[in-house]
């Protein structure tokens, strides 16, 4: 009897382990699990979960039909591994049908990823049970990638994307089969982008017809054996795309400067060296974790869906975006613009943020019509505005009156043919909030999208009632007395009734709908590095604009100092320094080697014979473009201007404005081929002056590298 009790207390024998193993055919017990019954650690539990998910992805439904005896393994928390697919036939499973509404888009919901099965019930891939997105190196800087519906490919780097079969979604923009390729910039200074496979309706063709079509579409890109490989492992209702190495004038120009080449470099970290990594590394990209991509919150999805519905059905709404600094206003506006371009031909955009402009160099207030998707940061899509005014500063402190007048001047050109998106500054405290109230009254938007986040301080909800009952800096509330100076009416721009315009001394505010969005966008900025990052982004925007000076890709790349500038006589243009009072005897010193706005004023310059011609105050006039005053010839009385503006537009320029926007230091320092002293670069200055340094222009860019790069450099 005692011996029987001892036998009951013993651990299970080897035969009992064999019974457990046979009772659970889908899961195999590891050797380490046989030797002990201890509780697993967190890391072991995560590995167990991954193995179970892989077994489930291969078709084995381990949650259903578990025979008796399997509870022993669960009770003892024994580690398991999935059985190979060849030993048991998985039960065919039908993949869930993704929702087609905007809020369920896989781009905006990174947790929505499923592993589809083929119609025959077998797994999509037999190459490796861990791979659901097979890649194929085509050579010549091209890689083929297959995406099942609902899955995404998050990456870092720059590439050109071509959709061969199916549909893709990048940053909210849909790329269909047969459309031209798109240049995609997924750089580490911003959130990484994700290429998503978009579900589409079942084609009416047979399986054989689909395979024949895929082979025909892939014929210009690969050989017969590679085409057969693609057809063999093509996922049902999936998408086929080709990623190419991107080589444009913008990319080549940015890579020649130290301050810009950092954003195009890949992170030099140790990763698993597999075939996919090697193939993607050849074209300059790398797969990243899904959580590093762009993700919208539920409130953002609802706001996006409502704005798209209103813009496509009800007409041309005016949408104003507001929120604190670096909260995601620009990111949300890009997603909204890309979604709208899927349904309508164009979107109007009013830029009111002076420091971080989207389509122009900094310091501008502009109105643009956007007809192409935005698949990168601002410095990758510099556009020509429909109307632009050069303010000359990155903020409007102590110049609120001039700022509001310029916004009204630019807003007059809005024709109400497309929806208008208004981007505002991130200054939302103190006078900045009151200035935002003035903008809402002046522009009278239909929707106000207010972004909030835990990273920023709470902001007063800008409801229609709050705007009506709050005094701005220069507009009065509904019930309080007017305490600013009067803003004159500006005609038919707002589209109000004539009796309302005549009876009201200030613009009539008709109310708006407030949409509050909780921002979950990732940001590399914080209070400590915000100033440094913003300065670098402004330099990148200037370099992106100057890249238009480069010739087509077939021509060799030339440095800026080797280009021939335009010669502008002193008596042909008037000059003005917008941010400071400069003595007339020193005005040419301020002009030389400066970033200048090429503007057009109403005054005629024909009556002047010598020059230079000085303006007494800052004009509100159209800015046609920008340039660099690379030299002044005092003998011939000429300005030497380097600008991408064509000659026919340059002939209409009669005013040069100089602001606080400076030329990046890397342009002065990167002048190859010069003999002797480099122009505008010297070390003969007093180091005891406040702010002087021997490494000027270098300290701004060294600390922006990722942490792993700085650690490697220290080593």
Image (cartoon, rainbow, N blue to C red):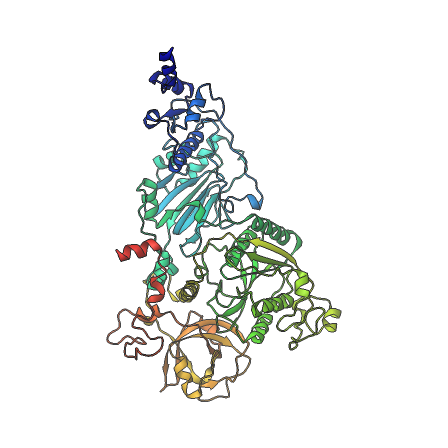
Residue 646 locus on image (x, y percent): 45, 70
Residue 685 locus on image (x, y percent): 30, 79
Q: On the image, which quarter does residue 400 sit in?
A: bottom right
Q: How many marks?
A: 0
Residue under the point 65% across and 64% down: 444
Relative to 176, residue 27 above or below: above
Relative to 387, residue 583 above or below: below
Seen as rendered, the residue at the extreme left is 676
Along the viewing direction, whichever of 41 and 426 lies nearer the viewer: 41
Relative to 2, residue 393 above or below: below
Residue 411 locus on image (x, y percent): 60, 68
Q: Quadrant of the N terminus?
A: top left
Q: Quadrant of the C terminus?
A: bottom left
Q: Is residue 257 visible?
A: no
Residue 34 locus on image (x, y percent): 34, 24
Residue under the point 70% across and 66% down: 496
Along the viewing direction, whichever of 639 and 462 lies nearer the viewer: 462
Q: On the image, which quarter does residue 405 sit in?
A: bottom right
Residue under the point 56% across and 47% down: 298
Q: Is residue 563 visible?
A: yes
Seen as rendered, the residue at the extreme front is 2
């Amino acid at each position: 009897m005692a011996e029987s009790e001892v036998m009951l207390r013993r651990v299970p024998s080897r035969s009992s382990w064999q019974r457990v193993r046979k009772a659970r055919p889908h899961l195999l017990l590891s050797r380490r699990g046989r030797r002990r019954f201890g509780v697993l650690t967190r890391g072991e539990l995560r590995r167990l979960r991954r193995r179970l998910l892989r077994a489930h992805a291969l078709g084995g439904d381990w949650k259903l039909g578990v025979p008796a005896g399997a509870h022993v393994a669960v009770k003892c928390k024994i580690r398991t591994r999935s059985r190979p697919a060849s030993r048991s036939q998985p039960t065919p499973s039908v993949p869930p049908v993704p929702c087609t509404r905007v809020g369920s888009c896989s781009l905006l919901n990174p947790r929505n990823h499923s592993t589809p099965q083929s119609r025959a019930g077998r797994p999509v891939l037999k190459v490796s049970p861990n791979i659901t997105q097979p890649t194929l190196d085509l050579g010549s800087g091209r890689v083929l990638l297959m995406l099942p519906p609902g899955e995404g490919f998050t990456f870092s780097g720059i590439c050109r994307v071509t959709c061969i079969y199916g549909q893709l979604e990048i940053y909210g923009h849909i790329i269909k089969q047969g459309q031209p390729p798109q240049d995609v910039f997924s750089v580490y200074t911003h959130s990484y982008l994700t290429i998503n496979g978009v579900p589409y309706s079942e084609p009416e063709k047979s399986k054989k017809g689909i395979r024949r079509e895929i082979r025909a579409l892939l014929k210009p890109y690969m050989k017969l054996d590679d085409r057969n490989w693609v057809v063999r492992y093509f996922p049902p209702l999936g998408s086929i795309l080709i990623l190419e190495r991107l080589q444009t004038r913008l990319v080549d120009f940015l890579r020649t400067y130290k301050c810009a080449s950092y954003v195009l470099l890949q992170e030099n970290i140790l990763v698993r060296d597999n075939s996919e990594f090697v193939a993607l590394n050849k074209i300059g990209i790398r797969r990243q974790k899904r959580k590093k991509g762009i993700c919208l919150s539920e409130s953002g999805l609802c706001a996006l869906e409502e704005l798209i519905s209103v813009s496509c059905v009800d007409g041309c709404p005016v949408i104003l975006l507001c929120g604190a600094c670096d909260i995601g206003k620009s990111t949300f506006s890009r997603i909204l613009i890309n979604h709208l371009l899927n349904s309508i031909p164009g979107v109007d955009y009013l830029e009111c943020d002076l420091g971080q402009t989207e389509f122009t160099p900094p310091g501008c207030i502009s109105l643009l019509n956007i007809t192409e998707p935005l698949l990168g940061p601002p410095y990758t899509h510099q556009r020509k505005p429909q109307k632009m005014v050069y303010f000359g500063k990155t903020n409007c402190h102590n110049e609120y009156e001039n700022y509001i007048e310029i916004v009204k001047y630019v807003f007059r050109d809005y024709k109400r043919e497309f929806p208008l998106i208004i981007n505002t500054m991130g200054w939302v405290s103190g006078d900045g909030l009151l200035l935002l109230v003035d903008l809402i009254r002046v522009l009278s938007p239909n929707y106000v999208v207010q972004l909030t986040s835990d990273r920023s301080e709470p902001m007063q909800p800008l409801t229609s009632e709050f705007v009506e009952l709050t005094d701005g800096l220069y507009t009065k509330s509904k019930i309080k007395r007017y305490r600013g100076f009067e803003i004159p009416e500006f005609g038919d721009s707002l589209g109000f009734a004539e009796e309302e315009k005549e009876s009201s001394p200030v613009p009539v505010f008709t109310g708006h709908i407030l949409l509050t969005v909780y921002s979950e966008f990732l940001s590399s900025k914080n209070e400590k590095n915000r100033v440094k990052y913003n300065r670098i982004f402004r330099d990148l925007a200037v370099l992106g604009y100057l890249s238009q000076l480069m010739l087509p890709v077939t021509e060799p790349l030339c440095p800026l100092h080797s280009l021939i500038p335009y010669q502008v006589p002193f008596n042909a243009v008037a000059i003005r320094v917008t941010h400071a009072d400069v003595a007339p005897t020193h005005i040419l010193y301020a002009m030389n080697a400066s970033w200048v706005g090429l503007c057009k004023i109403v005054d005629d310059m024909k009556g002047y014979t010598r020059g230079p011609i000085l303006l007494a105050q800052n004009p509100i006039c159209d800015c046609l473009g920008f340039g660099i005053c690379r030299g002044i010839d005092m003998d011939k009385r000429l300005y030497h201007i380097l600008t991408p503006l064509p000659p026919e537009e340059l002939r209409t320029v009669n005013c040069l404005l100089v602001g606080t926007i400076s030329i990046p230091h890397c342009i002065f320092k990167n002048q190859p081929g010069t003999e002797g002293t480099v122009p505008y670069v010297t070390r003969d200055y007093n180091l005891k002056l406040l702010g002087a340094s021997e490494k000027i222009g270098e300290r701004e860019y060294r600390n922006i590298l990722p942490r792993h790069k700085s650690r490697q450099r220290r080593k």
